[in-house]
Image (spheres, grey):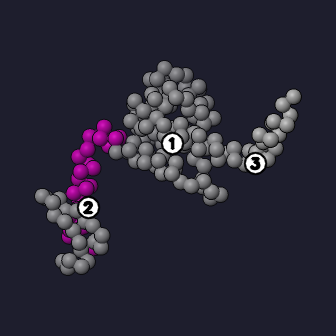
């Protein structure tokens, strides 16, 4: 293997392939096989943790995305559905577990309204920071209200308020 095309580091018995790797190289194939085996050897709980971490990262990425005309608004229930799908838990079971009526829980997410208590419960169960749920909710409200608020912003002002205080 030439060092120019196949840069890799040996660390104990692991091979970490870095930039410039050749996907047909033995080093790449060995690293891929080792990663595959690591994933296969994980417990169900460890797999859930990885999937939930991936979901949390997607939530953070959505929050960090700049609002623009091409940004697809992802309602809070989009992430909630992914959460249920990842864990294989039904909405009815989840609602029962947290002592809520399934219809009330469904309505909250459908309306994009997650309260502080629910966000904290979800953090305790799924280890996803409660503020992400609230921040996504807030971002979506801002995005949906931005078109609605353009007229009131022009209509209302401090000057107008002070002129009409009597």
Quickly name the residue at label 3. Answer: 150
Residue drawn at the location 44% of the way across and 23% of the way down: 97
The disc at residue 32 is 2
Q: Is residue 166 above or below residue 160?
A: above
Q: Main secondary structure of the magenta part?
A: helix
Within 10 angstroms of label 2, few (less than 14), some, or many (20 or more) residues? some
Q: Assign the N terminus to one quadrant of the image.
A: bottom left
Residue drawn at the location 53% of the way across and 36% of the way down: 134
Residue 105 at x, y percent in the picture = 56, 28
Q: Earlier in the sequence, mark 2 or mark 1?
A: 2
Within 10 angstroms of label 1, few (less than 14), some, or many (20 or more) residues? some
Q: Does the stretch in magenta take in 83?
A: no
User: Secondary structure under badge 3?
Assistant: helix
User: Secondary structure under badge 1?
Assistant: helix
Q: Give the foreground label among 2 and 1.
A: 1
Q: Is residue 148 above or below residue 30?
A: above
Residue 148 at x, y percent in the picture = 74, 45
User: Secondary structure under badge 2?
Assistant: helix
Structural distance between the alpha carbons of marks 3 and 2: 52 Å
Q: Earlier in the sequence, mark 3 or mark 1?
A: 1
| Tags 3 and 2 touching, CB below 8 Å | no
Residue drawn at the location 55% of the way across and 29% of the way down: 115
Q: Does the stretch in magenta take in 41?
A: yes
Query: Which residue is situated farthest in the left direction here?
Result: 12
Structural distance between the alpha carbons of marks 2 and 1: 30 Å
In the displayed structure, does residue 116 sit left or right of residue 126? right
Residue drawn at the location 23% of the way across and 59% of the way down: 33
Segment colored magenta:
22-49
Q: Earlier in the sequence, mark 3 or mark 2?
A: 2
The answer to whether residue 106 is seen in the rendering is no
């Amino acid at each position: 293997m030439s060092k120019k095309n196949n840069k890799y580091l040996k660390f104990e018995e692991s091979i970490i392939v870095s930039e410039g790797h050749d996907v047909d190289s033995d080093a790449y194939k060995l690293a891929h096989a080792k990663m595959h085996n690591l994933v296969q050897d994980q417990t169900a709980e460890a797999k859930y943790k990885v999937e939930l971490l991936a979901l949390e990262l997607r939530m953070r990425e959505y929050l960090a995305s700049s609002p623009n005309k091409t940004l697809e608004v992802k309602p809070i229930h989009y992430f909630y559905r992914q959460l249920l799908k990842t864990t294989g838990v039904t909405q009815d079971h989840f609602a029962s577990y947290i002592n809520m009526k399934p219809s009330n829980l469904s309505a909250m997410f459908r309306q994009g309204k997650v309260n502080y208590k629910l966000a904290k419960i979800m953090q305790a169960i799924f280890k996803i920071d409660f503020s992400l749920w609230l921040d996504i909710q807030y971002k979506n409200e801002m995005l949906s209200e931005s078109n609605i608020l353009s007229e009131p912003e022009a209509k209302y002002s401090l000057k107008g308020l002070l002129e009409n205080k009597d």
